[in-house]
Image: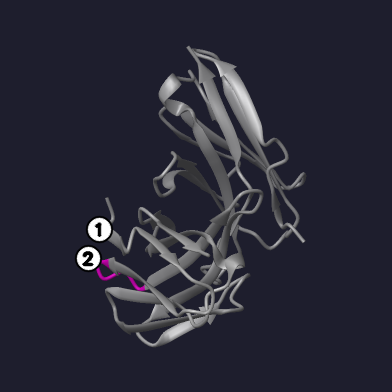
Amino acid sequence: DAGITQSPRHKVTETGTPVTLRCHQTENHRYMYWYRQDPGHGLRLIHYSYGVKDTDKGEVSDGYSVSRSKTEDFLLTLESATSSQTSVYFCAIMVQPSYEQYFGPGTRLTVT
Amino acid sequence: DQQVKQNSPSLSVQEGRISILNCDYTNSMFDYFLWYKKYPAEGPTFLISISSIKDKNEDGRFTVFLNKSAKHLSLHIVPSQPGDSAVYFCAASSPGTYKYIFGTGTRLKVLA
């Protein structure tokens, strides 16, 4: 257990509304990630962070922004949710020096 | 362009037999590979990894083989157990990027 929590675990929202998902870790790992999982696509990287205020884009970053003001929290924001952003979102941390990633339990987001 | 491919969406194996899950990649810069197991409604769980300086890594019932010339890796589970029934993802990263590219997953069903 890498001490990763995600909130909320489930959310239903309407198209055009802003949504923020939170990832919290308890072990001060430097690297944190946001993925989405969709049928037929596996896990795709949205954004990742390599330190407080240090973030970079992943494969599918359009429509998403992130912020990391504290080591333990990594926020994913959908500025204006669309139906194509209906997905399961996973947060992960990377443990050094092994480079293994550990995942949170996921957030199921439905955009209607 | 899918850099990491799992061409078998599903696999069924009898309990006690060997399960072999395959993964192909196209980026010759990848130097670190991981396998994850995912149960429904849970986050992926790290299983085993391998660095490109090795061709085999073993952990209990799980062995990962890497064939760099063929850009192919495989996960062997021996003996397979019903509790191994899950979706398995392979992932790869390039040196110094700390970003992971995932395959689309293979659903393993172990029959009792």
Do marks 1 and 2 both belong to one polypeptide chain? Answer: yes
Above-or-below relation of A51 to B78: below
The answer to which quarter of the image holds residue B81 is top left
Q: Position of residue A42 (x, y in %)?
A: 60, 51
Please say if the residues under marks 1 and 2 sit with CB atoms less than 8 Å apart: yes
Q: Does label 1 or label 2 sit earlier along the sequence? A: 1
Element under label 2?
loop
Q: Which mark is residue A26?
A: 2
The answer to whether residue A41 is seen in the rendering is: yes
Residue A101 screen position, x and y as percent: 42, 57
Q: What residue sits 36% from the left and 56% below the top?
A: A104
Q: Amino acid at mark 1?
A: Gly
> In the image, what residue occupies the spot 38% across and 63% down?
A93
Q: Position of residue A37 (x, y in %)?
A: 54, 55
Give the label on residue B55, or none.
none
Q: Which residue is mark 1?
A: A3
Q: Residue at x 56, y 61 (%)?
A: B100
Left or right: where does residue A107 sit relative to residue A84? Answer: left
Is A41 placed above or below B79 here? below
What is the x, y in percent for residue A13?
Answer: 44, 68
Residue B53 visible in image: no
SS class, disc 1: loop
Residue A26 on the magenta segment: yes
Which residues lie in the magenta part?
A25-30
Taking the view exactly as shown, the residue that stands out farthest to the left is: A26
Mark 1 packing: few (<14 Cα in 10 Å), some, or many (20+)? few
Q: Main secondary structure of the magenta part?
A: loop
Q: CA distance from mark 1 to mark 2?
A: 5 Å
